[in-house]
């Protein structure tokens, strides 16, 4: 599995909050045996540079990379240094102060991409082999890859370069320039092709290996915004071998990027002979010709500061509208009423786009984040948690003494006040089969059991089970009796549902709602992760970043890691990375790195 780690500016390097890890004073060697909470430390080691940009592992822990503006160190699985060096010495074009860096992990090693923006002179690009520390290639041909004059303290634009996209299936970089897009081999930098019929950055792409074709949707990158003339929204199908544009279509809407993650806010799917693009509704195209077949679109109500969602420049809400649900012959979409600002569900024939039915309209709904199909019923969640991405000004201590302010990124889940409920729709005609509004304070996500017959959902103080067909309430549990605070999330765990709450966890049996356990040991958790059956909770309050390992069978805490380091995975927060099997945690602080075993 490809794992992409990104570093743009020192203040936003990989993550969201400051954190702390207890680390030994070692250099170039490792030590084992220390405990981190109840976790066991496998080893402690040091990079030969300060990991202020990137500090990540390659997924299985066989390579651990730490970089600063001017140098990098790579450790092996035992914490020993594989290589370390200054970029200026490694690169033949003397790439040095790299405002942007990101790593693309491959089966053995990967690519470390460096961009050196020069104020006076030609910008430099270089790519280093992570496994060996050798330069693979460099170039000074590509300019305007990032906004000019960007200062690290500005906190602008986080993520891989908007103008450089790594195409996994082709092992190549797609580079956007003023008048063209260029595909180059990742290992050598050799140009494969160039086309002037596609302009902009790649917002999303799908690769078709049978035909060796790519379908791409563009967006207007910040770096090139002022340079473009005649920019238009494009979806293209392109021959990956030679860059030939096989068809070119236009689409409705503006492709935006999330505030912190910089993920393009759209999705693409190929189903049969059609391409489905999800951007403010669905737009459907013939995959062979690019002809638009049908659409069901709406105007977004997330305009900054003026719409229902009250977005602002440094705080934005996401995951507010459910993704489409596809069946073999139909698609279900949450729609927004343009004039009356209502929300409702539409069912469309997958082939013709014909509107088969529309549900009752819901007024005053801030979010409808989940939609479920079960037998002859469609369940709509009204209200619930939404994702917040935010940049906050915080005071930081300077290594030279004194302090300074910088923008620190946060990603967390939150609830907004609204009328919450569950709407169950008859799939045959779109009529309301039943509706429950017993969710006064909030509503968790809905868990539909594997049998498709029962659903489980909670509010702040109670936890319910429902028969999906009839709407009969199977049980009502007083969750506040568990004394773990209001429910904030639910986790499907086999025969049980674990309710993540403000002060801890409570587990309930699906068959009757009886409580399995309640534990009041963890507060302030706003994320949970299921990594190959290993469960983690995250607390990022008060400029902290704490990761807890949890035994979901009994609610026991296996251990915790708190880190104040730079780097780390954007998924787990500043200073923390976890292997893809969930068995090991890496905690970073400056030069120091600790490898921690989760299951003893």
Image: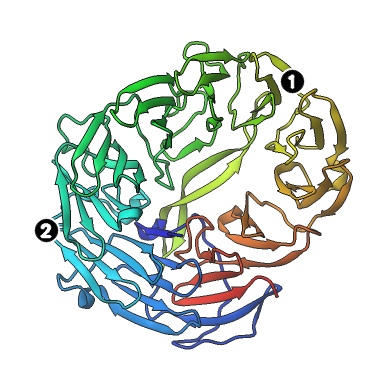
Instruction: Residue 399: tell me if it is visible.
Output: no
Residue at 17% across, 54% down: 192
- For discs 2 and 1, the disc positioned in front in the rendered view: 1
Q: Which mark is residue 120?
A: 2
Residue at 52% across, 16% down: 341
Disc 2 crowd rating (10 Å Cα; few below 14, some 14-19, many 20+) is: few
Residue at 49% across, 79% down: 77
- Look at the picture and state if 391 lies above or below 537: above
Dividing the picture into quadrants, the one containing residue 248 is top left
Secondary-structure class at tag 2: loop
- Look at the picture and state if 535 lies above or below 265: below
* Pick the front one: 52 or 506: 506
Instruction: Residue 64: tell me if it is visible.
Output: yes
For mark 1, what is the residue?
435
Residue at 65% across, 70% down: 598
Mark toward the start of the polypeptide (2 vs 1)? 2
- Look at the picture and state if 305 lies above or below 207: above
Q: Position of residue 285 (x, y in %)?
A: 36, 27
Q: Position of residue 457 (x, y in %)?
A: 75, 36
């Amino acid at each position: 599995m490809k794992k992409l780690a990104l570093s743009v500016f020192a203040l936003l390097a990989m993550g969201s909050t400051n954190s702390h890890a207890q680390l030994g004073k070692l250099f170039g060697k490792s030590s084992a045996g220390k405990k981190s909470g109840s976790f066991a430390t496998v080893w402690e080691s040091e990079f030969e540079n300060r990991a202020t940009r990137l500090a990540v592992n390659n997924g299985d822990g066989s390579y651990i990379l730490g970089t600063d503006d001017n140098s990098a160190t790579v450790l092996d699985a035992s914490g020993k240094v594989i290589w370390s060096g200054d970029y200026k010495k490694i690169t033949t074009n003397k790439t040095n102060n790299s405002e942007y860096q990101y790593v693309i992990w491959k089966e053995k090693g990967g690519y470390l991409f460096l961009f050196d923006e020069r104020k006076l002179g030609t910008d430099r690009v270089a790519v280093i082999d992570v496994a060996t520390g050798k330069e693979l290639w460099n170039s000074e041909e590509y300019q305007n890859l990032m906004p000019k004059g960007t200062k690290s303290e500005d906190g602008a634009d986080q993520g891989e370069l908007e103008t450089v996209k790594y195409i996994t299936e082709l092992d190549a970089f797609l580079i956007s320039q003023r008048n063209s897009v260029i595909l180059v081999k990742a290992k050598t930098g050799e140009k494969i092709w160039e086309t002037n019929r596609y302009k902009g950055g790649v917002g999303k792409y799908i690769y078709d290996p049978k035909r060796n074709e790519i379908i791409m949707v563009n967006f207007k990158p910040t770096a090139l915004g002022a340079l473009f003339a005649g920019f238009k929204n494009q979806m293209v199908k392109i021959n990956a071998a030679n860059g030939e544009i096989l068809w070119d279509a236009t689409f409705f809407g503006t492709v935006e990027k999330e505030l912190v993650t910089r993920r393009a806010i759209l999705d693409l799917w190929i189903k049969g002979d059609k391409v489905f693009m999800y951007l403010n509704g669905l737009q459907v195209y013939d995959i062979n010709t690019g002809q638009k077949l049908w659409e069901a679109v709406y105007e977004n109500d997330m305009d900054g500061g003026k719409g229902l969602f009250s977005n602002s420049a440094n705080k934005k809400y996401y995951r507010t509208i459910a993704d489409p649900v596809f069946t073999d012959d139909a698609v279900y979409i949450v729609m927004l009423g343009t004039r009356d600002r209502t929300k409702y569900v539409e069912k469309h024939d997958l082939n013709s786009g014909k509107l088969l039915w529309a549900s009752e309209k819901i007024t005053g709904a801030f979010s409808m984040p989940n939609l479920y199909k079960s037998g002859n019923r469609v369940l709509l969640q009204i209200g619930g948690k939404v994702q917040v991405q935010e940049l906050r000004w915080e005071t930081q201590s300077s290594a030279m003494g004194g302090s300074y302010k910088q923008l620190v990124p946060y990603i967390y889940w939150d609830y907004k006040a609204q009328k919450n409920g569950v709407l169950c729709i008859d799939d045959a005609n779109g009529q309301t089969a039943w509706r429950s509004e017993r969710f006064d304070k909030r509503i968790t996500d809905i868990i539909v059991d594997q049998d498709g017959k029962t659903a489980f959902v909670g509010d702040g103080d109670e936890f319910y089970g429902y028969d999906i067909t009839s709407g009969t309430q199977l049980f009502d549990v007083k969750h506040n009796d568990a004394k773990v605070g209001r429910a904030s999330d639910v986790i499907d765990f086999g025969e049980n549902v674990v309710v993540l709450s403000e002060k801890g966890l409570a587990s309930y049996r699906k068959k009757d709602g009886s409580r399995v356990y309640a534990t009041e040991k963890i507060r302030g958790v706003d994320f949970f992760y299921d990594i190959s059956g290993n469960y983690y909770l995250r607390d990022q309050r008060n400029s902290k970043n704490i990761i807890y390992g949890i035994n979901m069978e009994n609610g026991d805490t296996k251990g915790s890691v708190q880190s104040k380091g730079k780097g780390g995975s954007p998924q787990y927060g500043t200073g923390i990375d976890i292997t893809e099997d969930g068995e090991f945690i890496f905690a970073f602080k400056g030069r120091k790195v600790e490898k921690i075993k989760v299951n003893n």
